[in-house]
Image: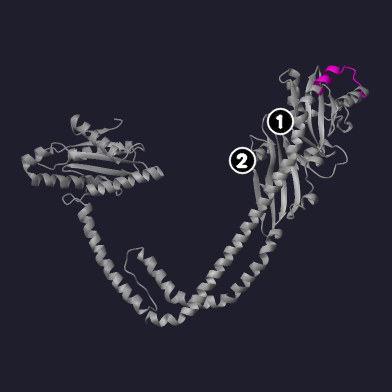
Amino acid sequence: MSLKKFNIFIVLISLSIMSLLYIYIAQKLQVSIEAQVKRSVRTTSVELRQQLFNDFNTLEMRFGHYEESSLKKLQKVVNTLTDDVSAETLADLMKTINTNVYDGHYDLFIINSDKVISMSTSKGDIGLDFKAYPYFSKELDQLRSGGIEYKISAPTFDEYALDMAQYYIMSMDDRWVMIGFVLPFGEYVNYKVDELKKTFPSLVDLDLYLLTYDNIQHINTTPLPAKDLKRSMQQKDQYANMIMHDLHLKKSPESSVVEVIAGNFSEHNIELIHDDIRQKSVVYTLVDSSFEETSDDFMLISKAVFDQSVYLAEYSELKNLMYLFITFVYFFMILGFFLIYKAVIEKISTIEKQMYHDEPIELKGFLFSEFSYFLSRYNSFLLRWKDEVKRLNEITLQDELTGCANRRFFNQKMKEQIDLHRRYDQVFSMIMFDIDDFKAINDTYGHTEGDNVLKQMATDVHEQLRVSDVLCRIGGEEFAIILPETDRKSAIFVAEKLRKVIASAHYIENEQVTISLGVDSYDKTYDFNTFYQIVDKLLYRSKEGGKNCVNSSNA
């Protein structure tokens, strides 16, 4: 049957190919839409992060603006306080240090020798035990010992007043004095979802987390009724476990959970978690951080939830129309593709697979006349070609006298082994040897006897080698052996074994025939010529050292 008779199927085939093309376009469109949605989520999260960063940076600048004056106020308080300080004294001092402070206020704290806040202008903090904060307790000890003059804490969020505070501490005899500069967080950072939705319609929820030393605080929008240290520590663990779970982080015995989380955001300032089934995306973003000093380290991390359907809406109509068209042409595609597949594509595919094996092609079942002719011509050509290649290989790669590989094959094999060494660090070695006083053998017994010695010696050497080893004749009486996956020590052992076998053989009556050998393993600093010259020099060192011996680079 001729292929020309198959032209009646061209229209059907064209329709099938068109259907495949549209399916491919639809898939690409779907992938493109999903990728675009994820890019949009990322872009929105970056814009949200920038807004939060700008807001928080303004708040940080306010803290920095008051830093120098805060330290002066703290020093003034330390110089003013006496041992019998009273609540009234603290109240008066608070009025003094809050003079000319317009966008926030100061709170004053007295920490007794047991590291407990004994007196404070912030009533809710009285009784707070700093021993519950190992890091802060250590800092207090350093202040007392004079290790540091004063301490400035990282920004801290007050979950009960919705304020952001930064604390300044000095040691005073057996007590500590601390002032906290407090700013209303909401006035500087817009973190309320309802307000942010006006700018970012896809935003579903937003949570901010502040990491400091060994603590994680949740910046909420509703003040808590009363301070509860135990509850705060439990919440810290809950927040930490949530972040670790969401980001698939693992606890480390050398680091705390907070340090693991901080280390992750130091490397990746944004983490995206997409749930395409629920059409939600959760994005963790590093908003701001400070690593100037260990004691002042903090990270502000946002967790934003975005609704993917907000971005998908504009693509839905186009996608639905595309799927409707694909469904319409799918039936025609299946019928046309099945016919062309069974008649042509399957046959061509089978031919292609068999061609990789360089064997005659066999096909069963229905065949076009053109296929049959092609297969018969191809099989005939292949058999002739294989015979010719075999003959040429024997001519070009084999030594005619000894049957060993020749110099051309030696060069090819060496380059292959060097390539394997460079790619996979696969060790290999080389032995070079030649027959001692071979000229004297030729002169005494004739070239015919010399040729017999070469052939018999090549046979004996072959018997001592592995299948993977390659024996090559590279000169008149000079030979080389390539030993794949063999180190220097093993190669020396093989060389010594060959030396003994040859020395004990009887190639010429009443005449001992010996060989001198050079051995070395390939090193990455070598190239082909360098390696060849090194082993060749080792061979000639054996010659000069008395012959019938082995020399290597380390012996």
Give the quarter of the image for residue 166.
top right
Disc 2 secondary structure class: helix
Q: Position of residue 459 (x, y in %)?
A: 20, 48
Quadrant into which the N terminus falls: bottom left
Q: Amino acid at mark 2?
A: Glu
Q: Which is nearer the N-term, disc 2 or disc 1?
A: 2
Query: Separation of disc 2 and disc 1 at Cα?
Result: 19 Å
Structural crowding at the residue carrying mark 2, measured as other residues with C-alpha within 10 Å and reported as few (<14), some (14–19) or many (≥20):
few
Residue numbers of the magenta segment: 73-87
Say which mark, if any, is on residue 267.
2
Q: Amino acid at mark 1?
A: Asp
Q: Nearer the viewer, residue 66 or 549?
A: 66
Q: Is residue 45 above or below residue 382?
A: above
Q: Is residue 39 above or below residue 232?
A: below
Q: Nearer the viewer, residue 335 or 92?
A: 92
Q: Is residue 33 left or right of residue 418?
A: right
- Magenta: main secondary structure equals helix
Q: Is residue 224 above or below residue 81?
A: below
Does 297 lie within the magenta span?
no
Q: Position of residue 189 (x, y in %)?
A: 77, 42
Give the quarter of the image for residue 477.
top left
